[in-house]
Amino acid sequence: MSELSPFLLYFVAALFIAFTRGLPRQVILLATPVITALHLWLNIEIGSTATHAIMSYELITLRVDKLSLLFGYLFCIASFIAGIFSLHIDDTKQHVAGVVYAGSALGAVFAGDLITLFIFWELLALSSVFLIWARGTERALKAGIRYLVFQVLSGVLLLAGALLYFHNTGSLAFDHIGLEAGVAGWLIFIAFGIKSAFPFLHSWLTDGYPEATVTGTVFLSAFTTKVAVYALARGFAGEEILVYIGVTMACFPIFYAVIENDLRKVLAYSLINQVGFMVTGIGIGTALALNGAIAHAFSDVIFKGLLFMSMGAVLYRVGNINGSELGGLYKSMPKTTVLCIVGALSISAFPLFSGFVSKSMVMTALMYEDYGYLWLLMLFASAGVFHHAGIKIPYFAFFAHDSGIRTEEAPRNMLVAMTVAAVLCIFIGTQPQYLYALLPWEVDYWPYDVTHVLAQLQLLFFSALAFVWLNKRGLYPPELASVNLDMEWLYRKLIPAGAQRTVALLQRAKSTALSAVAAPMQGVQSEFAKSSVAKYYLSESWPTGSMVFWVSVILAAFLVLDAFG
């Protein structure tokens, strides 16, 4: 039993879920994470491995250490909560996709080699996209396709990097890789960066997550970016470039979140912001910073899931999630309101809530390593989190103006799922020693000293004061019925427009070329015009084989760069 990979339990469960209905399916949905967690607790020991030989290559499907084990527990908790939240739906596609998605995340964090990691990396993409498409709208279909393009690109880069890494080192082991590995290291780094939602590579998240189903977004918020955080911690800990990338990730989403009307998209930007704290900690690379990054990943899955669930409950009952059209819902959804506030306090790092005991580790590590100016930027990011997630989400959804909407409270299973997450947020915030005991590196840190508590309370107090003042003076950006584009403007607007103009230009060039060839020939058949070369260059379609050609050219270029680099 010690060599039984946890993902197998999820994949077998997905098979049973596909052919059951009603109570049996619900039991399987909830029992799977519980049984898997017990398996991890009772049967899996630190140092356990499981290997399989395929074509003379040894693939490691199970490699257990404290880092992978912590993420294993986290993904079991996340899938259990998401399973409860989704009990009210009878959608085989969503249930199967959610369980396969969670199993793929477990497979990725226990993978001991790059090829096994790649397999689960792609399974994450293929299973998760159905949680977007299950919404059934045209917007969801298009967003899912764009989402899949980014995810597959990440997988292709990972595979190319793994092959180059094997070519250079003779090893496929997934341990520390580092950018010193050359082109191979950079390819793998960018692959991880796409799934981590690095700046300029993040639009798949803010574009796709808000278009997913009510329950699908809860699954999505838990796994993809956290698998990427795990991969960065495993392969690129201590790379200083991650510090600057992480600080950028923590800061830039604030500006978009403040002006965004779709409250689930606000949370999508907030997710990037929180991952920024984790990436920064991984880049610092000290034991305190890495523990802070992993602890914050653990906390974020729970409190961000709680916020996505509360907004999902609003969308489920009201049919709308735009801040400009909500307000006053505390009157008809009081329980959801209270649970959402718990999530808001947690993400804002209020003392006694989970965000406080994890985010503070990264902030302290920044100061210890003399990143004082970056610490100030992260302080700004912390205040921004309180503005857009701690205040804006509950305020515009449940308070603000009274929209006149009167509806029912969230379904019971949704309330239970949110309550479980809220209790965990408070438990972790008040008893952090239990989370600290699971962390991969030795912990010599305690968050509840007077200086830190007072400093955090002052930050939150003045942030709240600034929000109230700006709102009263009419200076806070209003909730407008609009769509705000950031990097996706490139492929939603610029690239389509450029492609249309390019096609029109080529068509005019083709017409001109045909006229030039036909004019002097007046009834004479040109041997060139009849040749395959002419047909190739004057045809309207680009031959499929050209893709193979250009991929070969790119791979050859990487090999040359690697050889002479």
Image (tube, rainbow, N blue to C red):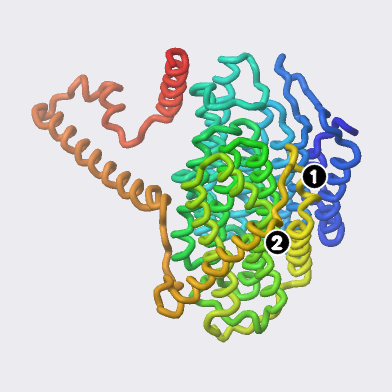
Q: Position of residue 296 (x, y in %)?
A: 66, 50
**Residue 466, placed above or below residue 94:** below
Q: Amino acid at mark 2?
A: Phe
- Tell me the element at label 2: loop
Residue at figure coordinates x 54%, y 22% from the top left: 181
- Identify the residue at the far front of this view: 451
Residue at x 87% of width, y 47% of height: 35
Residue 199, horizontal then vertical, whole percent: 46, 45
**Residue under circle 2?**
353
**Which secondary structure, mark 1?**
helix
Q: Quadrant of residue 224?
A: top right
Number of callouts: 2
Numbered mark located on residue 275 in the image: none
For the residue marked with disc 1, what is the amino acid? Ala
**Residue 201 appears in view:** yes
Q: Position of residue 414 (x, y in %)?
A: 74, 67
Callout 2 crowding tier (Cα within 10 Å): few <14, some 14–19, many ≥20: many
Quadrant that contains the N terminus: top right
What residue does disc 1 label?
437
Report the residue at 51% width, 77% height from top: 325
Report, in whole angstroms, how far the alpha carbon at label 2 lies from the one at label 1: 18 Å
Q: Is residue 58 left or right of residue 455?
A: right
Residue 158's image quarter? top right
Q: Is residue 242 above or below residue 134?
A: above
Q: Quadrant of residue 535?
A: top left
Q: Does residue 90 appear in the picture of this structure?
A: no
Lateral position of residue 21 relative to residue 514, left or right: right
In which quadrant will I find the C terminus?
A: top left
Q: Residues within 10 Å of mark 1 (few under 14, many from 20)?
A: few
Q: Is 190 drawn above or below residue 320 in the view shown?
A: above
Is residue 26 left or right of 100 when viewed as pictured?
right
